[in-house]
Image (cartoon, rainbow, N blue to C red):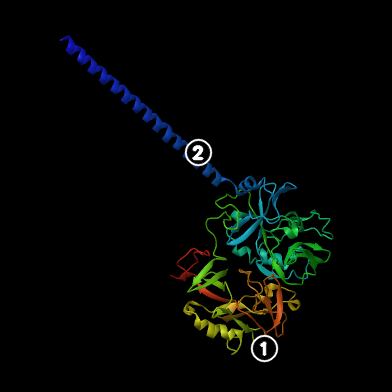
Amino acid sequence: MKKRKRKNKKKAKLVINKQKIFSFISFVFIMVCIFWYGGRTIYFYLDSKKTIEKQNDTLAKNIITTNLNTNNFKKINNNYYFQNDTNKNYLIYSNIIWRIIKVTNNKDIVLIADDTITNLAYGKNKKYHNSYLIKWLNKDKEDYTGILENNLNNKTKYLTKTETCIDNISNIKKITCNKTNKNNYISLLSINDYINTGAEKSFINNEKYNYLANTKGSKIWYIDDNGKLNSNNGEVIYGIKPVITLKNKIKFISGDGTENNPYIVEKETKKFGSYVKLDEDIWRIYEDNDENYKLVLNDYIKVDDEKLEYIYSNDNFYHNDTTYGSLAHYLNHKYLYSLSYNNIIESAKYHNSYYGKDNNYDYSSVMNTTIDTKVGLLSIGDPIINNSLDNYFILTGPEKDTDEIYLIKKDSTLETAYTTDEAYVVPTITISKSILTQGKGTSTDPYRTE
């Protein structure tokens, strides 16, 4: 009996040891799980919180934090300027590519269009607020047409009025900013800001002629195609690069400011500048009417992959699609009928007049004279969406009675040619809004009819 009891006691000890080992292993496993999954939960929570905080940052704060210690971002007079050939200041707003000039002392963000948006003369009136350029950009007053402002998305939500230095500068080595204008949402670039971004070394210099906001006595300052500052009497047709100011409360949505990933500040925008694909052709929306879109081809007309060169007419710059041999006839017959989608193209009014000394370079007078046609061309006063194209006709002549016509050049100047000269062709058409049922309007996912 004693031997049996010893044997049973041994077995009992064995059972107790296994339970302890199992309990220990279970404890270790549970603790590992707690630390592993608990740690991951905390990590992802903090990471998520960080992401949310980043998304809720104002754009101004994000810009300053990201670029504070970089070479091309400098503080000048309490404003943070992007400088020289920076590639960190791209932003898209209203389907226009902008470049950030500066973040101001109160965290407003001043932008300039990356390219010119139309071509106009300053006019004989050298007062900044009465210039035709400012009237084309803004609609704040009764006699301002506000061609560009009408196409900007939700202006009162995103923009504040732009403060612009408009001093009379006689010497660029003695730049002052004693007189400012803050009456408009859309402005022109000041010499001060151009100098502070690096002048000819600046990202603003892209080999385009464009007017500035400052005068030089009775002349107007402009940037030439080499990025140099110069002046003229304001009666030369150059490009306009609009300047706007985003409110300091604008939130950062996405992007890092690079060309391939620009800053995004709006979720939905207007259709201006959007891409439209009809058959294999890519068009851009340059005018948004109540029921229609006006489109401009995003390239030249090509025949057998070669750019078409054509004479305008044997008479004058007036568009007459019944005159055989004219460009107007070609566009509304041979070209129109070659399009598989010609049945959706509507007859519309296009501006067809003259622009020069005879009407004091008043673009609005050009817009008062129209012709009805299905396929037309751009005109003085129309926004220019694609500035990479060169040497193509528009529907505007330089004088009232002349056999000359304007050609648009890729350096944002206009050149006169005889109507019997050959040039490239960039057509315009009008379609109903209702037929665009597919796509997002981007270059990779353009609007489509089906």
Q: Secondary structure at mark 2?
A: helix
Residues 386 and 361: in front is 386
Quadrant in the picture for residue 272: bottom right
Q: Is residue 327 left or right of residue 233?
A: left
Q: Position of residue 417 (x, y in %)?
A: 70, 81
Nearer to us of marks 2 and 1 is 2
Q: Is residue 356 left or right of residue 303?
A: right
Q: At label 1, which amino acid type do we have?
A: Asp
Distance between the alpha carbons at the discs numbered 2 and 1: 73 Å
Q: Which mark is residue 315?
A: 1
Q: Residue at x 52, y 58 (%)?
A: 268
Q: Read off the residue under disc 2.
A: 46
Q: Residue at x 65, y 64 (%)?
A: 115
Q: Residue furthest top?
A: 2
Examine the rendering and report whether any part of residue 136 can be seen. yes
Q: Position of residue 418 (x, y in %)?
A: 70, 84
Give neighbour class at mark 2: few <14, some 14-19, many 20+ (Cα, 10 Å).
Answer: few
Total numbered labels = 2
Q: Residue at x 83, y 66 (%)?
A: 218
Q: At label 2, which amino acid type do we have?
A: Leu
Q: Quadrant of the N terminus?
A: top left
Q: Position of residue 433 (x, y in %)?
A: 49, 70
Label 2 or label 1, whichever comes before in sequence order: 2
Q: Quadrant of the C terminus?
A: bottom left
Q: Position of residue 420 (x, y in %)?
A: 67, 86
Give neighbour class at mark 1: few <14, some 14-19, many 20+ (Cα, 10 Å).
Answer: some
Is label 2 in contact with label 1 (beta carbons under 8 Å)?
Answer: no
Residues 73 and 167: in front is 73
Examine the rendering and report whether any part of residue 142 can be seen. no
